[in-house]
Image (cartoon, coloured by chain):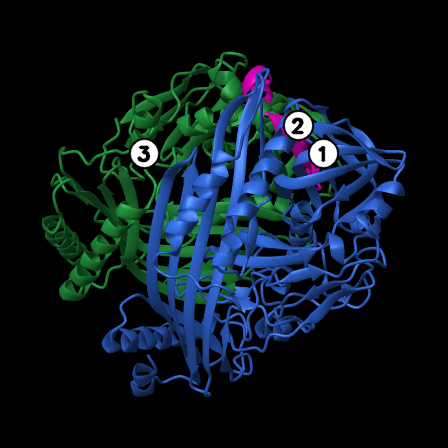
Chain colours: A green, B blue
Amino acid sequence: MSLFDQIRKQEKYFYTLGEKVVNALESEEHLTISFSGEETQFYRFNKSKLRQATNVSQNSIELDFIKNKRSISKSLNLSFNESTDLNMCLELLKECRLDADNLPESQSIVLPQAGTDSCQIIETAAASNIDVTAEVLTPLQDVDMAGIFVTGPVSEGVYNSKGLKHWFTSNSFYFDYSLYSAKQKAVKNCYAGSNWETKKYLANIETSKKLLEKMDLPVVDVKPGAHRTYLAPGAVSEILSTMSWGSLSMAAFKQGYCAFAKLKEGKEKLSPKLSLQENFELGLSPKFNSLGEVSENKLNIIENGELKTLLVSSESAAEFEVPSNQANNHEMLRSPVIKPGSLSHEDILKELGTGLYLSNLHYLNWSDRMSAKITGMTRFACFWVEDGEIVGPIKDLRFDESLYNCFGSELSDFTKESEINPNTMTYDRRYIGGSSTPGALINKFNFTL
Amino acid sequence: MRDIFKKLNVKADWWGLRHINQTQTSLSVRDEKLDGINKSYDNGVMAEVLVNGQFSFVATNDLIFDSIQRAFDKAVEQAEKNEKWNLYKFSGEQRPRAVGKYSSAVKTKFDSSSIYEIADNLVNATKFMTVSGDTQLMSRSARTIVSETESLFLSSNGSDYHQNLTQCTLDLSMAASLAGDNQTRSNGGQVGQFGLEYFNKDSLKKQSMEISQELAEILNAENCPSGNRDLMITPDQMYLQVHESIGHPLELDRILGDERNYAGWSFINKEDFGSLQYGSDLLNVTFDPTISSELASYEFDDTGAKAEKKYLIKEGKLVAGIGSLESQERLGVDGVSCARMQNWNRPPIDRMANINVEVGTSTMDDMISSTEKGILMKANKSWSIDDYRDKFQFGCEYGRLIENGRLTKVVKNPNYRGQCTPFWKNLKMLGDESTMEISGSFYCGKGEPNQVIRVGHAVPTALFSNIEVFGGGK
């Protein structure tokens, strides 16, 4: 049986199981069941050799049960043995009922809704047709590389007691890696896709190797202070990930934790050059959330510096009496795109003039949420530039800067070109999704240590 | 599972099977109502083989014999196929025989109705989070995770290690607004191997009232001043300072470069062990998985290495690293029993367990009275450190100035920054037993594929001289 035949069989099995569990519901009980599955091959590398190879096959479902103004979730692994899985689900239903009789009332209740079904199975080969270790490692034997190669299908599904059905499968790979010079200076890159192409891979690592040569220039000791700074798309992506963590959530705003509270209240401004969308046309993540709600293809969040909406889940909508925009329950960005600007890639160094060119940032965190201030470190290929010429790599610097400055009054421009940043998180399971970000030229960016 | 293991036919130099069955309940209460409850039943196995010096891992949640046999077959095939690219040829001594049992020493075990009692107590706790006057209450939260993990490790060289861990978190926090400024205050997050006894109604009420009082203080406080002064940090901040600037840099797999692409490297080199003066001679740091209520206590690690207390830093000098038997062999440096896996679906890597700072001899009063110009900071709210684990910045929820030997005014948004060894060399006084608390983190992230692990830190209050501190604002 082919991989995708097997996945279609899983989809059918999930709906059949779901229907049986829903049939066991009693009056005034409601249920949404979500599926999460993967068959992932991990290769972990160090010094351009294989450190650990791990294969993970895991499938689970979550039951979100509603009764008596109580909302209760239970999850378990799915074995694809019908009697085993059904019996366990029915046991969980019993537990849910008991919980609903004994737990306090929930903050908000969102009942399952009917809707239009969807099924998206992206039938690509990923890296299934290559010998991964040989293909990846052979051209890297002349350089010190550390990284991870991840490949295989990931599926998500939803079925609810109104009969709504959604399924999404993607089969993709990524090679997230860094190369190291003899002086222990590094360049970071990622080659990702749905179908492995050797030519593209070789071009990707060639670009990294060329950049690594520049890391052997003498190190420049840049003093802390405010510097004109170019943030490459990877660095902008790191800032965007931090923004997703509580600055754009309606629940965070109402509960006092929102980093963009002052923006929402009209007390602070962002640059008119900043526009941020949720854009599911990127095709990296499903449009449905864990409740089975389907988002619009595009949702303007920040338009020309103005906050158009926060992310609002149906739970927040019910609790705070505001309209939902079908955000997921954590109200985090799923498929964000920052609109490109007018700065040409070839002109970056010239436009930067004298200052810092930062490829990547590391370990970002809010240092003062009320001021939308983020601290973090420079990482990997970061250079000091003078009069449009790279002078040399820098010693890592700590920054501490407000988004109202770097994406506000001090934002010079974004680049015309954007890069896709696939989500490479693998905590508990393999994540899907990603973002699209341009580079950003900042007039003054504050470094502290 | 023992019967399945006996029947397996594995063509490997060594093989091991780890079965992990974890039941975890996450309960969240906000503003006296249920904000979410999720109970997960996670049950799977990791098949591990050693073939021609290469360890190879295959994980599945399908627990019938045929699937587990297939997992071992796949693990062997994976190792054989990739032998040419092997980073290091292991001998098999990195998987010693481990036989025994370990259970968390909880006083009152959880049963099926315990969560209802906990929920009632958490609702009650949020009732006692209050504000007064013009202050606008934004949210009152109480959260817990109760995690019960049963694991069994069987191996071809006779290991049979059964473990039952009960690990919990308890977080109380509230947010309020005054004159356009939002502030939060929490109980600092409590973690450990404890039972139902920890969710005592009166204790929760007391904690809620304390954080209400201190939230009111910081809402009415001035911003933390900038400049250098002595810094005193309580265990709810000290634990993370230890975690980030001692625990992580000492991990041998970082020094070996395994983590360079994700979590990062270390400023420590192999040659530093036995010679580097890491901190002042007051600093004694141990790896100690033997303290029963601490989060990461166990008898054997996930490769079968016996867990024992060991000094990592003795009188300020670096003496050993946080490295498994694999890393110790690869680097040639002394380590500890710290090969740990997050769950059945991830391989073991070098992790902290309980990384503790031994207590000093000073009382809180001793430290305060000896300080001319200083600041007390409590409860972490922001953290960041570079990929070599050197340049750090931390923010806390609550600050109070120390002037001429006395605690004076409360300040909001207190932060400090520094570099690792200069900071620890500035350790001036260390609190005695009365200042010590058992703390830790439920979410220490590292590894490719990513893993979170639960880490304990038993630490006293500490006083550091001449640290750069600053407040909030853009």
Which image quarter: residue A2? bottom left
* Mark 3: amino acid: Leu
Residues at marks 1 and 3 touching, judged by CB atoms closer than 8 Å: no
Is A66 displayed left or right of A173 in the figure? left
Question: Image point 43% across, 33% down: which residue?
Answer: B31
Q: Which residues are magenta?
A: A384-412
User: Would you name the residue on which mark 2 appears?
Assistant: B218
Q: Is residue A294 above or below residue B42?
A: above
Question: Image point 11% across, 50% down: which residue?
Answer: A19
On the image, the x and y values in percent for residue A431 come to 37, 47
Question: Image point 14% across, 65% down: which residue?
Answer: A83
User: Would you name the residue on which mark 3 appears?
Assistant: A282
User: Would you name the residue on which mark 1 appears?
Assistant: B399
Residues at marks 2 and 1 touching, judged by CB atoms closer than 8 Å: yes
Regarding mark 3 in the picture, which secondary structure is present there? helix
Q: Is residue B259 above or below residue A414?
A: below
Q: Is residue B99 above or below residue A400?
A: below
Callout 1 crowding tier (Cα within 10 Å): few <14, some 14–19, many ≥20: many
Residue A253 in view in this figure: yes
* Mark 2: amino acid: Ile
Regarding mark 2 in the picture, which secondary structure is present there? helix
* Mark 1: amino acid: Gly
Rounded to the nearest angstrom, the CA distance separating label 2 from label 1 is 8 Å
